[in-house]
Image (cartoon, grey):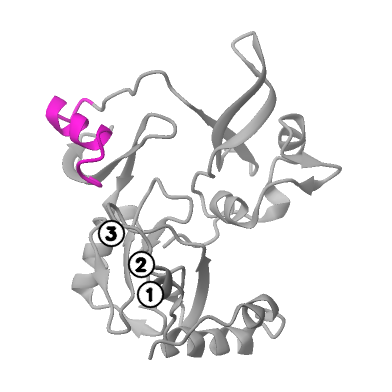
Amino acid sequence: MNLIRYNEKDLPMKELETIGLAEKGQLLINVNDLKALLSGRRTGLLNLKNLEAENIKIKALDAKISLQPAGNGKTELLVHPIYRKPATPDFLEDFEAKELEKGEVASLLKVTKDRKGDTKEVLVEYDPETREFIISDTEKVMAPDMINGEKLTPAQKENYRKGKEVALTDDTKLNYSGKDVNGIRSNKLALIASIIIDGGISYMLYTGLNAMFGEKHDETTAKSLSKGYYNTVLEMEDQRPDFSDNLRKAKPVISR
């Protein structure tokens, strides 16, 4: 789960306008890409225009973008282009890199050292769209306290941080993915993750979720959302009365 790390007012609008992703102060990207940006994740592939890098001008290219703190209270735009050849992390064996590149495994857990020489566990994934290895520090992955109102056990939270499958009693299955635009993959098209902060509950609605690794969405199952999901929607409405106009229009099937 990724809470919102940035505010829309902190977006580098001039840079976004320059590369064709905003116009007259209005963003020209979809809601999921915006949510990914504000959560500190990468967007999906976008068509960028008028790029300059190392005295080279690029008229247009497809790339993903993300944000990082600029150190002066502002945010900096990062561009993740499509690489000709992936740069393999030095802690990966050749056969492990090939397994990821060929899509034989979804991810690998590896133990490595940071710049200070301290040991850390990382989740390694491969993004075939940009030909890039995506590395997530498992200690920094925030596991939700609840999904669709169901509390996760300590073991489920640990599995989530490590990119492993988490199965709930309402038939929802999910896992964390650092390369996915939503940060979560699921057998359902939508779910609500909750985290408890200072005694209060923060909610994150995920829609249009991608299927889990090696699987395809079963149309009926994916659209069938549980009572726990809809009860959590009501809790969100209590906090934000204007929240669910769009949700009420969709009316998926309640599974239990």
Give the residues drawn in magenta, as a range. 90-107
Q: Residue 221: which disc?
A: 1
The answer to whether the residues at label 2 and label 3 have Cβ atoms under 8 Å apart is: no
Nearest to the eye among marks 2 and 3: give it. Answer: 2
User: Residue 31 at what x, y percent from top left?
Assistant: 64, 57
Marks 1 and 3, how far apart in space? 25 Å
Circle 2 packing at 10 Å, graded few (<14), some (14-19), many (20+), is many
Circle 1 packing at 10 Å, graded few (<14), some (14-19), many (20+), is some
Mark positioned earlier in the residue sequence (2 or 1): 2
Mark positioned earlier in the residue sequence (2 or 3): 3
The answer to whether the residues at label 2 and label 1 have Cβ atoms under 8 Å apart is: yes
Q: Residue 161: which disc?
A: 3
Q: Which residue ends up furthest to the top in the rendered image?
A: 55
Nearest to the eye among marks 1 and 3: give it. Answer: 1
User: Residue 98 at what x, y percent from top left?
Assistant: 20, 30
Which residue carries the number 2 mark? 187
Q: Amino acid at mark 3?
A: Arg
Q: Residue at x 38, y 91 (%)?
A: 256
Q: Amino acid at mark 2?
A: Asn
User: Is residue 235 part of the magenta span, yes or no?
Assistant: no
Q: Amino acid at mark 1?
A: Thr
Horizontally, is 15 left or right of 235 in the view?
Answer: right
User: Residue 49 at what x, y percent from top left?
Assistant: 70, 26
Q: Which residue ends up furthest to the right in the rendered image?
A: 24
Residue 114 in view = no
Residue 186 in view = yes
User: Is residue 105 part of the magenta span, yes or no?
Assistant: yes
Horizontally, is 56 left or right of 92 in the view?
Answer: right
